[in-house]
Amino acid sequence: MARSFMTYLRQTQARHYFPFDHVVSIHMILGAAILFWACLHVGGHICDVHRLALADEEDIYVLFGEENLPKNPLPEDPGARWSMVLFQTRAGVTGIFMVLCILVAYPLIYVRRSYFNAFWTSHHLLLLMLLALCVHGTGNLLEHYQSVFWLTIPLGVYLIPRIWREPPASKTGVIGANVKPGGALWLRLEKPESWNSRVHAGMYAVINVPAMSLYEWHPFTLTSSPSEPFIEFHIRNAGDWTNKLHKHVQMLHDASCSRHSSDADYRLVMASTTGNGIAGKK
């Protein structure tokens, strides 16, 4: 969705004319439109290939041109012609690849809340689909290819900020973390110095927990005030990654030390340790 580019546009006068706050809904509507027209496109070409499989060889050469077809004589068997178009032409191979990307990526949109990792990973297949679309028509079977010209700028707008934001912008330490009653995870982090003039109410930050995964980044709304010397989040357990994060924090707290109140129940307390020892109590 080119989030970095959208964030930049929100700070310009364009925000008065375009609904940047609804980009997610617009993104989903455009995705549904792409799926609809892709289905019509595939259906039309299925009809084309069926007619080609039954057509006279002379008519086929007149339609496509001799330079765009194999030098060998066209097979007479309709099944062999289907195989030739689907697996021996750039349009056929890239078309099958794009259909497979759609079949994998689009159904997983409906499980994004519970299995965000699967959704996020599969969603990148749509990016590969667009790259395949750039070479889909380069065989010039029906007309001169055009897709690379109207896809270059949108792909550049997405890829350049995406590559720029892949390295972590800043590393910060954990001040405190705990699972509150009701299942919400409270997380307080040190505030990077560069954030003092950049944080505003209602903003979100993208979080990565290296102990869980080096490549997963998840957006969460800041619940701390911009004037506070720390940044704070309240994260609900709503999916696979947040479930791991809750368990990770609970494990750290469970392994840190025993309850203070339990020590007062005994006159003598004995502590034994092996390996790395036990954590001390403040």
Image (cartoon, grey):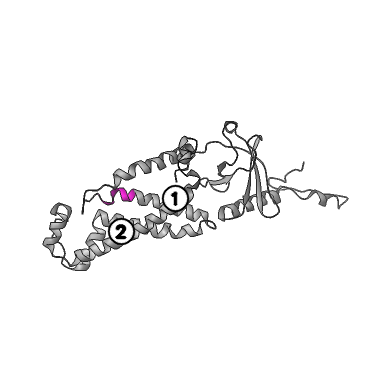
Would residue 260 be found to the left or right of residue 277 on screen?
right
The answer to whether 61 is drawn above or below residue 14 in the figure is below
Residue placed most toward the observer, 223 or 190: 223
Amino acid type of disc 1?
His
- Up the image or down, 93 lies above or below 153; here it is below
Chief SS of the magenta region: helix
Q: In which quarter of the image is residue 190?
A: top right
Disc 2 residue type (three-letter): His
Query: CA–CA distance between discs 2 and 1?
Result: 21 Å
- Determine if the magenta segment contains residue 136: yes
Residue occupied by mark 2: 41
Quadrant in which residue 210 is drawn = top right
Q: What element carries label 1?
A: helix
Looking at the rendered structure, which numbered label has been put on residue 27? 1
Which residue: 52% across, 54% down?
Answer: 116
Q: Where is residue 25 in the image (x, y as percent from the top left)?
A: 48, 51
Q: Residue 18 carries which label?
A: none
The image position of residue 172, as x and y in percent, is 60, 37
User: What range is drawn magenta here?
Assistant: 131-137
Q: Foreground: 204 or 66? A: 204
- 211 on left or right of 134: right
Which of pointers 2 and 1 lies earlier in the amino acid sequence? 1
Q: Judge whether residue 165 can be spotted in this image.
A: no
| Residue farthest toward the front in the current orientation of the protein | 17
Quadrant of the image for the C terminus? top right
Q: Does the magenta stretch include residue 109?
A: no
Confirm whether residue 185 shows in the render. yes
